[in-house]
Amino acid sequence: MNPDQTPVDFLAELDDEQRVAAEALLGPVCIIAGAGSGKTRTISHRIAHGIETGVYTANRVLALTYTNRAASELRSRMRDLGAPGVQVRTFHSAALSQLQFFWPQLTETLAPKLVTNKLPIVRDALDELKIRVADDELRSITAEIEWLKYGLVSSEQYQDLERSAVASLSKDKFLEVAARFESLKQQRRVADWEDVLLLTTGMLRNEPRMLAHVQQQYRHFTVDEYQDISPLQQSLLETWLGDREELCVVGDPRQTIYTFAGADPSFLTGFLNRFPNAQLVELNRNYRSSPEIVSLANRISEHGELEAVRVFSSKPTLQKFSSASAEAKWLSQTVSDAIQAGTPASEIAVLARINSQLELVEQELTKLGIKCQVRGVGRFFRRPEIMQAMAALRALQAGQLNHPLFAEVSQILSALGWSSRSDGSDKWLGLNWFIEVLEEFPSDVSLDEYLRELQERERSGHEPVMAAVSLATIHATKGLEWQLVALCGLNQGSFPISYAKTSAELTEERRLFYVGVTRAKDRLLLSTQADKPASDFLALVS
């Protein structure tokens, strides 16, 4: 820590509720953090305060996040607060690190090769079973396989569940595909990201010596976005914890939007049942948005109210258009006007329920010469120069490094067209991302650790932020905010989505609307198309 800083300095930067949370150093602790309430600031200052007061030792703290983007931000905050020794990881990254460390000791072989894209293997499983599906059906089948594993749902349990048919497959046929997929991975000695969590959990539970090593290493745990944790992740967390209670969880029931992917918010909402002696702190001061935007968010939410801190006035506006084409033209012109008026392109986002709703907007922005970045669809990682750089860096693992890692990385990137001086091109910006990621770590970071980080960013879709307008589904915006946010396509069947039928599914759609609204700092634009029924959510807009 900076010798000129005292614990009081850290706490003085926090409001009253944040300070209470930061002073609750010994677990169990549950922090309910509303949108824009300074959650990351609170977490980082809490850990820094614990280290400064001697309650924590930096390298004995493990902070776990749901997304790689959140891990990167928290890691940066800890470095700025003088605590770079704190381990900040996603569940996947932490598990992969432990698996690769312990597996050779257990088996005298390397851990199974990680596959970051399981779609080709699922396709092979379908081909072997002579099942033909479209690309969107392939993705649906893959997502259902992931849901099974994140939820720790057995084949027998799955048969008894009321689940919609996937790609018109019967339950028996889907389970046959899932089993063939698992068989192919075993034959090829590869593992996907869910396997990493499963294998690590099983290995630690069956090897007391290895578990003791991990539990000795990490004494204090902080888990962010706890409302989105899955049973599989919870199982790994409980393994790490053992019978200890030094756990701080941070989350918001109002922002639970991943139950379709196996998330179980009951771990957050039932935290006090599992830990009756836990300290509970609520953060509901919104520092992000105008009072009118916060007021709309409160009308959407069914779990407590946010308190607006900013005092300027900015009312959400609702626009109706004759068609999706007219809506896209208006959105692109509005974005252009905002940029001309001085709003940076990187502070503007057009959000929708699904990616296909953004295609017309992208076309219209391109016509106006406005650069845009489509988030969450993995385009960045499919660019040729990025794929070539990733392949070359993986190849380094086959031999000994002849130079420091930074020099080796720079040499690879230079061969692909990168130089230390920017030429402003997208290619240079993309290749320079590898340098930016490397610079987040201490100078002695290992190649394995660096590659784990790159693979984890690819898994989570954590692309570099470009000087461009963001186009994204709301699911891809967790932890992000913009000065100007436009929520488009607010029509029944689109938002809420047509396949949301049950009360639970419609409630999650409403939470998704809440997340979209609370991404806006200064301006919120809502739009709908008159050739379709308007979204029921618009009744909340006054």
Image (cartoon, rainbow, N blue to C red):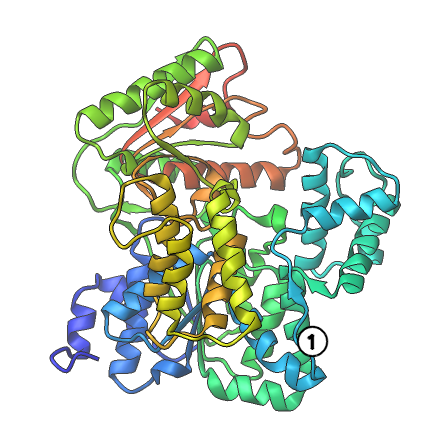
Left or right: 341 with respect to 84? left
Residue 33 appears anywhere in the view = no
The image position of residue 313, as x and y in percent, is: 19, 32
Please tell me in which quadrant of the rendered image residue 14 appears. bottom left
Residue in the foreground of this view, choosing between 273 and 121: 121
Task: Check disc 1 and report its element: helix, strand or loop.
Answer: helix
For residue 120, above or below residue 200: above
- Disc 1 residue crowd, few under 14, some 14–19, many 20+, Cα 10 Å: some
Please tell me in which quadrant of the rendered image residue 321 appears. top left
Q: Residue at x 47, y 63 (%)?
A: 453
For residue 157, above or below residue 334: below
Left or right: 106 with respect to 44? right
Residue in the foreground of this view, choosing between 197 and 282: 197
- Work out which residue is located at the far left of the displayed protein and give it: 4
Looking at the rendered structure, the kind of residue marked 1 is Gly
Residue in the foreground of this view, choosing between 298 and 434: 434
Left or right: 173 with respect to 193? right
Q: Residue at x 43, y 21 (%)?
A: 363
Residue 97 appears anywhere in the view = yes
Q: Residue at x 71, y 47 (%)?
A: 120
The image position of residue 491, as x and y in percent, is: 51, 21
Q: Residue at x 57, y 84 (%)?
A: 243
Q: What is the quadrant of the N terminus in the image?
A: bottom left
The image position of residue 198, as x and y in percent, is: 67, 68
Residue that label 1 marks: 202
For residue 227, above or below residue 484: below
